[in-house]
Image (cartoon, rainbow, N blue to C red):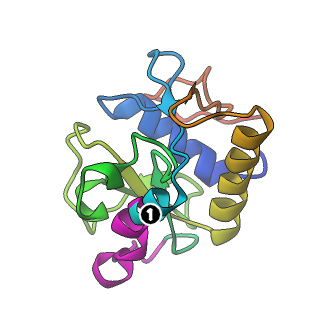
Amino acid sequence: MNTHKYPAAAAYYWVMMEKLASHPGSEKYKKPLHRLADDAKADENRDKICMRAVAEWNPHPDATGTSCDEYPFAKTRESGGQSLSSGKLCVQMYDDKNTGLLQLDSNYPYPTWNEICGRAAVPAKQNTSAGGDVGRFTSEVRLLDNDAYFVQTGFETCDIKSVCNIG
């Protein structure tokens, strides 16, 4: 993940890996994601977590963008869409245009961190470009259905309890 090109997306994925009890995609916790090669199932996952969100999703007004980004990704076996009916059951976050920091969305209940997924309001360019990079990576390394992989965000040396600046 290119932290400089996609700071909001990368920070969001890293927070999800650190804070969710399942630590999806984290090499540190030895919890890889597993590729889902079924495009129809991935579309269904995305629809449950984000696309239906148009009717139920109310991103914070200070968000830098209103593109719905889900983690774990729709094309993974760990996607919230695999078992949930709605993204409102995920941790809700947004990239704050006023502070430049990733924030919990106060429009939703405070998370327990036992949720299995997150969704965040991020700039559309970061969402689609970061997702495209992940898709190209899985193709380039020839990941097959159910193959495991870890997500690297550039924040791996940070401490979740402090603000981390990437140089």
**Residue 2 colored in magenta in the image:** no
Mark 1: which amino acid?
Arg
- Residue at 74% x, 40% y is 137
* Magenta residue span: 45-62
- Residue at 52% x, 42% y is 13
Can residue 25 be seen here? The reply is no
Tell me which corner region of the image, top left, top right, bottom left or bottom right, holds residue 128: bottom right
Circle 1 is placed at which residue position? 46
Residue 46 position in % (x across, y down):
44, 63
Tell me which corner region of the image, top left, top right, bottom left or bottom right, holds residue 156: top right
- Drawn side of residue 48 relative to residue 155, left or right: left
Residue 44 position in % (x across, y down):
40, 64
Q: Label 1: state its secondary structure.
A: helix
Q: Is residue 155 above or below residue 120?
A: above
Who is closer to the viewer here, 16 or 78?
78
Residue count near mark 1 (Cα–Cα under 10 Å), binned few <14, some 14–19, many ≥20: many
Who is closer to the viewer here, 137 or 55?
137
- Residue at 29% x, 53% y is 90
Residue 41 position in % (x across, y down):
43, 58
